Image: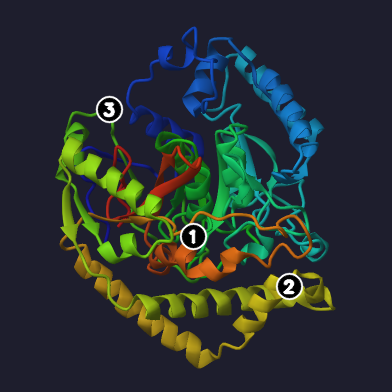
Amino acid sequence: MHLEPEIGAVILEESGKPEDRVETALKCLPHYDPAGSWSVDSTASFRYWKIRDYAYAYRSKLATPSIVAEQFISAMEGFANKKPPTPLLISFDAEDVRKQAAASTQRFEQGNPLSTLDGIFMAIKDDIDCYHHPSKGATTWMHEVRPVEKDAVCVSRLRSCGVILVGKANMHELGLGTTGNNPNHGTTRNPHAPERYTGGSSSGPAAIVASGLCPAALGTDGGGSVRIPSSLCGVVGLKTTYGRTDMRGSIYAGTVEIIGPIASTVEDVMLVYAAILGSSPADSICLKPSLPYVPDLSSHECSHVLGLLRLGKYTQWFNDVFSTEISATCENVLNRLSETHGCKMVEIVVPELQEMRMAHVVSIGSESTSSLTPDCEDGKGVKLTLDTRTNLALFRSFTASDYIAAQRLRRRLMYYHMEIFKKVDVIVTPTTGDALYLNNYGTTLLGYVTEEEANFEAVLSEPVFQSYRSHRAFNLPDRIEVTEVSLSLQILLCVFLSQMITRDD
């Protein structure tokens, strides 16, 4: 049964055209003032250019997609020669980028842009098909057994909006890790602090957005793979409700994985989300989610809704971190929400977290093994890195009984969370419990042997909680200036908090 839309919320029609959904979402955003981006001293220091900044520049003839393309290509060449190396993209074709940009420039010259996203540069994680680039899943061989014949559904929706697809972004091999470390193609470094990991597994998408080269990117998330790198790189990542985005054309898709957007701002996440959403009628393992809504942030009703929110806080999560800076930063954010905007803080208890972590590992491990094993035949599996082979060996030890028990536990955990949501509107947690340093092996073949692995639970525990219950979650970044580390607060939604709000459930 679908719920009626909330006051101040607007339905996005799944059956409609992606470009129409984008324009509907655009009308829900606050008024755009170009003076904020195009003042005389606006170029004095680094800043993130938002999607609406590009859209304004193109329509005002201040820039063209072709001009931006040349700057992007030059920047990518610079990153390729950077010391230490920073491999953001696994597959990149400069001539293809120029061709897409020229077509977009021509549409603007003729006065016929496809949408607000026309001419917007985006990177696609290497486990999502983007024709004509190979999908390697950051391995050295996956493209040999799984050729790409067309775009993934989400990518085709972006292409229909005029998005310029710059290539396949780096990632942790097969998505089976939280650091983003990759001996095969090089480890993407954190743009804010090169001595630190980006987090993973969507390391490349988060880093290319954080570096300012693309306003948005697509990643995948089954246990924090969008939110962890977004948090550590200081950008916004959205894990959509399970089933909200069509997974056809991704290398691996189980009952916890989704495709989600990464961007520098919540409004850009909202625009990309509007373009890619749409469940698949052919999906055999997911009931169709309820109607997607976005908040009408331009409406009078939404101007007061933030102060009505009840924020659920499980204090233990704020204590179980490896740095007091993390908990202090998140506490400061909550204090601002409470004192400045009137949000009500509600203390909650989330039971059986350790059991939940184990059940999640069994579920995602069993499903990934089932999906990947056929591709690992004929000796291909031995070409995987040691940490990936170790994870797959662990996953193969799980039995059918283990998997069934995990699903029973999953149902109980979903009951617990529904009881919590009778008392609160959102649940807030630190996105990660640690900020990850590269060690001395960070760029070598042995790079997977890192101190971070000992902190695995600190990095992964909070994101796993949201993934396993199929609900939407996203991270809001905050900077710790002393260490130049970007950390964030994670928000699990019964409503989408931005400034704040959508509803799927």
- Judging depth in this view, the residue of 417 and 331 nearest the camera is 331
Position of residue 439 relative to residue 194, above or below, is below
Task: Give the image location of residue 135, x and y in percent.
Answer: 73, 55
Q: Which mark is residue 386?
A: 2
Residue 356, visible in the rendered structure:
yes
Q: Which residue is mark 3?
A: 298
The mark closer to the camera, 3 or 1, is 1
Mark 2 Cα-neighbour bin, 10 Å: few <14, some 14–19, many ≥20: some
In the shown orientation, is residue 293 left or right of residue 362?
A: left
The kind of secondary structure element at disc 3 is loop
Q: Earlier in the sequence, mark 3 or mark 1?
A: 1
Task: Give the image location of residue 114, x and y in percent.
Answer: 56, 27
The mark closer to the camera, 2 or 1, is 2
**Cα–Cα span, label 2 and label 3:** 51 Å
- Amino acid identity at mark 3: Ser
- Asked which quadrant contains residue 353, the reply is bottom left
The kind of secondary structure element at disc 2 is helix
In the shown orientation, is residue 139 left or right of residue 3?
A: right
Q: Earlier in the sequence, mark 2 or mark 1?
A: 1
Instruction: For the residues labelled 3 and 1, say whether their Cβ atoms are less than 8 Å apart.
Output: no
Q: Which residue is mark 1?
A: 224
- Amino acid identity at mark 1: Gly
The kind of secondary structure element at disc 1 is loop
- Amino acid identity at mark 2: Leu
Number of marks present in the image shown: 3
In the shown orientation, is residue 296 left or right of residue 376?
A: left
